[in-house]
Amino acid sequence: MTNYLLFHIAASISILTFMISLLWTFGYIRERVLLRLRELKVRTRNFIDLSMIISRLILPLPIIPQLRFEINLATFTIGFLIFIAGVYFIVSGVHKLYPKLMYGKPIDLVTDGVYSVVRHPIYFGDSVWPLGWSIMFGAICSSLLTPIWLIIYIITTYPEERVLKEMYGDRYEEYKRRVKRIIPYIF
């Protein structure tokens, strides 16, 4: 059991940062700007998000003891493709929202590109890349955490979609009818 202590610590940090992110989304934690670089604002939220990424990058690595399966070229390739797909959705989604995310500038409703496949491509990608990363390292336990990330992101979408409905009205409702919430073509 002590062999898995490092896994439990890393998984707990990852889940804790997701919980903090959820509390942030529901307004229980307030926005704080830590540093300003010209127009760019570095916020507390940026550090929380960075912690979520780092903990999920470390979790599947061979230095973290956990149940593992044998890796071969096929499983590594599948994992790599899933990882790349997740990163693609994140990068493409952030690219479309960049002026808003980095500078707080208003933007119009985005419905093209990856946003024509899923309403929350960044959340989808951020749920999927850790699965691909885990498969690449044959990490069973960390790959089984994927549904937790997905559930947390699904919960996060509800208050965000209320705000989007208020901002864009019927245009957003029509967009919701055409495009699935977080899993392309499924949910």
Image: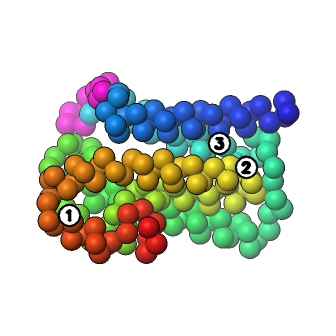
Q: Which residue has dot 1 on it?
A: 172
- Quarter-wise, where is residue 41 in the image? top left
The residue type indicated by label 3 comes to Ile
According to the picture, the residue beneath numbered tag 3 turns out to be 58
Left or right of 133 on screen, residue 160: left
Cβ–Cβ under 8 Å for marks 2 and 1 = no
Amino acid bearing label 1: Tyr
Q: Does residue 130 appear in this view?
A: no
Residue lying at 67% horizontally and 53% vertically, measured from the top left: 144
- Which residue is depicted at the point 48% across and 47% down? 152
Q: Earlier in the sequence, mark 1 or mark 3?
A: 3
Kindly report the distance in space between the C-alpha atoms of the residues bearing marks 1 and 3. Answer: 37 Å
Q: What stretch is highlighted in magenta?
A: 30-40
Going 62% across and 65% down the picture, which residue do you hit?
80
Q: In this view, does 43 lie to the left or right of 136?
A: left
Q: Is residue 6 above or below residue 148?
A: above
Quadrant showing the C terminus: bottom left
Q: How crowded is mark 3: few (under 14 residues within 10 Å), some or many (20 or more)?
A: some
Q: Does the magenta stretch include residue 7?
A: no
Q: Secondary structure beneath disc 3? A: helix
Q: Which mark is residue 141?
A: 2
Q: Is residue 20 above or below residue 109?
A: above
